[in-house]
Image: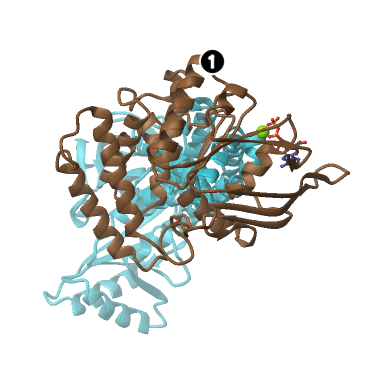
Amino acid sequence: MSDSDVKEPEATTEDGDAKGDARDNESPAPKGDAPGEGAKADAAKADAAKDSAKSDAPPKSGPYRPTPGKPLIEMSNVTKTFHKGKEPLTVLDGLTLTIAEGAFEALMGPSGSGKSTLLNLIAGLDRPTSGTARVAGHNLEKMSDGELAKFRAQNIGFIFQAYNLLPVLTAVENVELPLLLTKVPSGERRKRAETALRVVGLSDRMGHYPRQLSGGQEQRVAIARAIVNDPTILVCDEPTGDLDRKSADDILALLTKLNQDFKKTILMVTHDPSAAERATTTRHLNKGRLD
Amino acid sequence: MVPVKYNIRSLVVRKTTTAAAGLGLALVVFVFASVMMLGNGIRKTMGRAASPNVAVILRKGSDAELSSGISNESLNLVKAAAGQVSASGKGEVVGEVVVVILLDKIGTDGMSNVTVRGVPDGALGFRSTAKVIAGRAPKPGAADEVMVGNGIRGRFKGLEIGESFELKKNRSVKVVGVFSDDGSSNESEVWGDLNAVQSAFGRDGYVSSARVKLDSPGKIDALKAQIESDRQLGLIVMRESVFFEKQSEMTATFMTALGVLIAVFFSLGAMIGAMITMHAQVASRQREIGTLRALGFSKLSILTSFLLESLFLALVGGAIGAGASLAMSFVKITLLNASSWSEIVFTFDPTPAIIVRSMILAGVMGVIGGFLPALRAARVSPVEAMRA
Ligand SMILES: Nc1ncnc2c1ncn2[C@@H]1O[C@H](COP(=O)(O)OP(=O)(O)OP(=O)(O)O)[C@@H](O)[C@H]1O
Ligand SMILES: [Mg+2]
């Protein structure tokens, strides 16, 4: 059992909604005549997104519902200090940052400047030493490990430089993983995972294991895994760092599409200036501060 | 929940370490199940000859026939009592003498004890399960003829049909037949003429035990009351099933204790094996664990996942061990039975309960052995795991 399921009183209504979902998806072409495969998938995906948004809205946790005029990410006066060696190492020093919903931001900076550290704080993988990290309506600095896990499951999609697919699971099984943390029934899980793989253009690679895929394909599976739960924010740590130019461009185009068509807020760490160009804003981190 | 196929496939991918740990677990379960089966086989073998409406009578203070003695006068009183208790007026009574002789074993240099039972005419008829399966029964009153139980046939010199051996110096007897008795411990005995055995061993006028067959099991209590109330007689009456239990108690208890001892000590080794394997699994899957944690799987679900993995490993190992132990039911083993000091042939006797207990042992080993590694997996910090 994970601590991110059960506990919610809306369990029964959610189940009902989920069944409704399944029926929706079975009826062909829910939004008029879909011209192509991609568009149909997009429509189904958008449907699923809309349904899951209305199905559960528990007060404390759950998918983010925007408050008009409020930024999605608000880091204020954040400090992060590591105590590993003899000397404590302060990586982030009084950093303040706000990111609006729907943004596509690139984060650049020299190696060791704290980009990954900042990303981890925003994604709820770690807590700041001091300061506040308010993300998608949650004050992360006050949350327990269990609450953070739940927060990540519901709000964050991760895309890593090293893809981090589970080697013993097939593409579609990898993509299904985040859905195991929801109440989506198993038949529906498979459908949603397949839809997500279609969105990233891998409908013909569902049953393949990561070792049977190219790097670019692995990263696309990882992106499908990141979006399958319909999270608010996509957090990408050098998503094209291990890829050749062509694959990198494909991935960046995909991210742009997710930002523009699916309204995902994207935060991307990169060393690659041409990748940063795809973003709407680029910030530079230097010695623990943004300039 | 992390899907179980993730754990199973991860075990399959790392074939060698998985197989090593699985075999260790299998071995422990195999030994445990076998010893339990043997303990069970001993109880069954000893008890198999028991008939519900037969009472065994021994001298007070004896648990075994070898140490008991009943005079002919006492035997007659027993016969009278049996007649009174049984409705038909005649309870069937046999008085038998039991001694032990040393015979040369075939195949090894050593000698071993063999139980010789002197039986009156009609002893075969008294035991409904006993029957001659080769040759013939000794002629009534023939002092120089014996038959041997199927269990020891061919395992001692002179115990084949047509062969002879010395009951006592200068008292040669000839084997004329082989009898079976439903696989019971009787099959490990030599049966000869009562008078011949009595005189050869200087036991004239005495039998070791009396057996009384009554019309119904319920009448045994009445017989017991009547015979035991006569203090002068100094005899005890017990149901044949109780008698056999007493014969096997020591050996069977020893076997069960041995089984438990093995379970405790050997399983320590197997658990350490499972622990090492699971530690290796956790160490080489840090990044995968970190990824799962990043995706939002809780510490508890990681702990559960690795515990299940270890449990699965142990149950597969256990199933192999338990399965292999079933093959032991084709094996016969010779043990010195403590109460008669002679060799008895036992079989390994599997029961569903033994298999269930073995699998529980495997499961417990898996959970205990897997606990620390699973705890370590649950403690993996996603941030650290991703940096590695
Ligand atoms: N968990 C940790 N424990 C100790 N030190 C850490 C930890 N995480 C990061 N650091 C240190 O903090 C500094 C910033 O690390 P971070 O990974 O955020 O840099 P980065 O900007 O992402 O660099 P890169 O471009 O190389 O990925 C580094 O000096 C690193 O060694
Ligand atoms: Mg980094």
Residue drawn at x 42%, y 19% as measured from the top left: A212
Residue drawn at x 31%, y 41% as measured from the top left: A45
Question: Which chain: cyan?
Answer: B
Pointer 1 residue: A244
Q: Residues within 10 Å of mark 1 (few under 14, many from 20)?
A: few
- Can residue B167 be seen at all in this image of the molecule? no
Number of numbered discs present? Answer: 1
Q: Residue furthest right?
A: A86
On screen, residue A45 above or below A63? above
- Kindly identify the amino acid type of the residue bearing the numbered disc 1: Asp
Nearest the eye: A52 or B48: A52
Residue A241 in percent (x, y) is at 59, 23
Quadrant in which the C terminus of chain B is drawn? top right
In the rendered structure, the residue with mark 1 lies on which chain?
Answer: A
- Can residue B355 be seen at all in this image of the molecule? yes
Question: Which chain: brown?
Answer: A
Ligand 1 quadrant in view: top right
Residue B25 in percent (x, y) is at 50, 39
Q: Quick one: SS at disc 1?
A: loop
On screen, residue B335 above or below B79? above
Residue drawn at x 62%, y 42% as measured from the top left: A119
* B279 left or right of B27 in image: right
